[in-house]
Amino acid sequence: MLGNHAGFILASYGLSALVIVVLFVWVAVDGRAQRRQLADLEARGIRRRSDRRAEGGPE
Amino acid sequence: MRLIDYANPTRFLSLSAALLPWIVGVTVVLFAVGFYLVFFVAPADYQQGETVKIMYIHVPFSWLSMFCYMTMAASALGTLVWRHPLADVSAKCAAPIGAAFTFLALATGSLWGKPMWGTWWVWDARLTSVLVLFIMYLGLIALQETIEDPARAAKAGAILTLVGVVNIPIIKFSVDWWNTLHQPSSVFRAGGSTIATSMLVPLLVMAVAFTFLFLVFHLMAMRNEILRRRIRAMRMIEAAGVE
Amino acid sequence: MSALTSLFVREMRLATRVGGGALMGALFFLIVVTVVPFGVGPDLNLLARIGPAILWIGALLATLLSLDRLFQADRDDGGLDLVLMGETPLELVVLVKCLAHWTATGLPLVIASPLLAIFMNMEPVAIGATTLTLLVGTPALTFVGAIGAALTVSLRRGGLLLAILVLPLTVPVMIFGVSAATAAVQEPVPFATPFTILAALGLFAMVLGPIAGAAALRHAGD
């Protein structure tokens, strides 16, 4: 179905899929790491200045 | 709502969280339709045979390599002129994605060229311009990685992006001129206006699908970057001992 | 204008004194051109054909490598802050600094190029054409390079990064410079076509370089 240059077609689609999957995994893993660190910091009671102001200043 | 209303990162986070599933859904549907059209509907080219299937991803990649740079240029204007707080996040996150798509444009172009030209690489005007663009992406990423202070890195990157935008048409023109000088006949003519409708429709669907894919990655990366900056600020508060 | 004139004189004095390194660029140029025959072989016909390209690449590298200290020295000794606070437009300051830098390091390259062209076995017409294109083209390289120098001013090792950032932007200058130089001896294009475009690129870089460089310097400060 892909003719006698099937290798090149499959290689280009395969390579594109690979790069896009790597990009996706990288973004997803990075996002998970950031959310974990943020949760960790919040669990230790560290607030951003804007959050503290919203709660009526630092205790 | 004006654009400045999205300047609040918290509002951007909630808005993008609400929008992302929809955009992902549209992307998936577009790719399903696109792949069906490419592999089951689109005809083989009478000259290039089935290798023309590579065009359906190669052309969107080269389109995205430009689109992504234009996104960065718009963000660079936002950083320098309006000092929009999300603009430099947007520019910084678009750079690696743009570099990846530009790399894919080069790689698929090369894979398409091998059966057509008999070599992996020719110094064709189009491929050469894309190669220069790829180097510019890498330079931008290198500049942003080298300057430690995020605000300063963003401004330096924005200036370089805008200088690049001014220069890209000149580079394109000179590479075209240089190419006609050295290779009078170009084999590679994925003809813009001469393309048949049966091929144009799948191509357009694929181009829109990849643009949505870029949007998904860009939004996800921007959310990460906002969180990263938030964590950085919190670490500084922690280190300063303001508790 | 007197402020800019005295800036020019200061830059020239700094460049030509001991440790200024003005002639270092020309020396580097000589070495690049000398190394090429060891790479491609001493075939005189081949060297004559690629001679203009070699001279252009040598000049490009020599210009870029000499540029990394363009603003850094001023930043280190605090002179840059004075200039930023001063009344003279920063764009004009960058322009004058580039002109002084070109006079001190670019002009020696142009003067040396006919001598090096003899090593490359080039014909007299080609030598003249190459020297002329370098005379018009090297200022463009300096102005474009100044953008990179301003962007990397705060980095301790900006030299290599500067070259990476600037080289893609110098592609048009390179193309039309070498084309004009070879067009003088080969038939297909008249010399004037690429040469006038090269001159236009030079004028364009003269506007873009100072504006973008000044913007980068302003943002590097705050």
Image (cartoon, coloured by chain):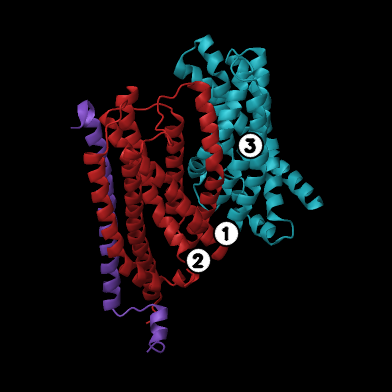
Chain colours: A purple, B red, C cyan
Specify few, some or many for label 1: CA neighbours under 10 Å numbering under 14, 14-19, or 20 or more: some
Q: Is residue C168 above or below residue C77?
A: above
Residue A11 percent location from the top left of the image: 24, 35
Q: Nearer the viewer, residue B210 or C185?
A: B210
How far apart are the two marked residues, 3 and 1, measured between alpha carbons? 26 Å
Q: Chain of mark 3?
A: C
Helix, strand or loop status at disc 2: loop
C176 vs A26, left or right, is: right
Q: Is residue C4 visible?
A: yes
The secondary element bearing badge 1 is classed as helix
Quadrant in the picture for the C terminus of chain B: bottom left
Q: Which mark is residue B84?
A: 2
- At horizontal 43% and vertical 36% (from top left) the residue drawn is B192
Please state which of the two labelled residues, at mark 3 or mark 1, is closer to the viewer.
3
Task: Describe the element under mark 3 as helix, strand or loop.
Answer: helix
The image shows residue B81, relative to residue C45, as above or below, that is: below
Q: Position of residue C25 (x, y in %)?
A: 60, 33
Q: Which residue is mark 1?
A: C219
Dot 2 surroundings within 10 Å: few (below 14), some, or many (20 or more)? some
Task: Report if the CB atoms under discs 3 and 2 are less than 8 Å apart.
Answer: no
Q: Check disc 3 and report the residue beneath it.
A: C201
Which image quadrant for residue A16?
Answer: top left
Closest to the observer, B17 or C175: B17
